[in-house]
Amino acid sequence: MKTQQFVVIGLGRFGSSLALELMDLGYEVLGIDRDEEIVNEWSDKLTHTVVADATDEEVLKSLGVRNFDCGIVAIGNDIQMSILAAILLKDLGLPMVVAKAISVLHGRALEKLGVDRVISPERDMGIRVAHQLVTPNLLDYIQLSKNYSIVEMNVPECLNGKNVGELHPRARFGCTIVAIHRENGVIVAPTAMDQLKTGDIMVIIGSNENVEEFEMMVN
Ligand code: ADP
């Protein structure tokens, strides 16, 4: 078992899949849901599960929630409950509080409460899928901030045999190739002399606009 401990509040579709993945990664997870049936469903798959109302401060205290490294509020549909649970986790002093938002305004409210990371799964997935649909070589797209993103894409046929220097990604597109994955390893921070081959995966960072231009060039 790894040392970091997570508490997941709300074991709906998002919360349960997040909790299960953390378990698979070797972490300890306490799952809390007010619905007994849902808790029973996950009780043998998570380290601990509890039927509780996460908006009850005394209950959270008695469960020792303040000792966890990270708390995730995975309640989406009930915005009031989500906000109350997030306030309590912040007040309890957990080093990292993450919360799922179901709308822009919900996300803004969570940010104002000091939630360290707000996640909007549907919105983020919509953006990713749109990029993947228009750029067949695109494998993954992560928005780092409002203006910057990082993308992972297959090296297309047109770049086979070219080295990074010939491509001039920074001068032509304002993008940086930060890594090249290939079967026998990863080249981190490739130099101008490193050669691209079909079958490789490049990881590119840049402003949204520049990354899009790069995507169009290799499409
Ligand atoms: P999803 O869309 O990911 O399935 P939902 O918002 O539908 O998310 O599910 C959230 C879960 O959170 C539900 O299982 C619900 O029982 C639980 N939940 C809602 N309010 C509370 C609360 N105050 N305390 C604990 N669990 C809660």
Image (cartoon, rainbow, N blue to C red):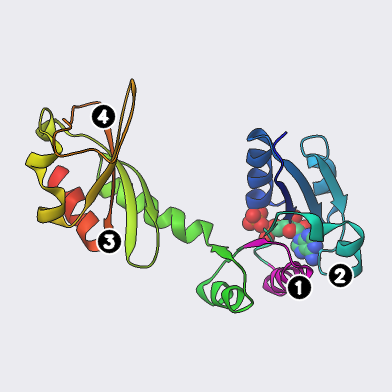
Asked if disc 1 is less than 8 Å from ligand 1, the answer is: no
- Do callouts 3 and 4 mark residues in contact (Cβ within 8 Å)? no
Q: Looking at the image, which is closer to me, 121 or 35? A: 121
* Dominant secondary-structure state across the stretch colored magenta: helix
Instruction: Give the mark nearer the N terminus: 1 vs 3.
Output: 1
Instruction: Return the residue at label 3.
Output: 208
Tell me, yes or no, if residue 96 can be seen here.
yes
Query: In the image, which is nearer the foreground, mark 4 or mark 1?
Result: 1
Residues in magenta?
Answer: 78-98
Q: Contact (CB < 8 A) between labels 4 and 1?
A: no
SS for tag 2?
helix
CA gap between label 1 and label 2 equals 10 Å
Pointers 2 and 3 in contact (C-beta within 8 Å): no
The residue pinned by badge 2 equals 57
Q: Upstream in the sequence, badge 3 or badge 4? A: 4
Would residue 61 be found to the left or right of residue 172 on screen? right
Cβ–Cβ under 8 Å for marks 1 and 2: yes
Q: Who's the residue at 62% across and 69% down the image?
A: 115
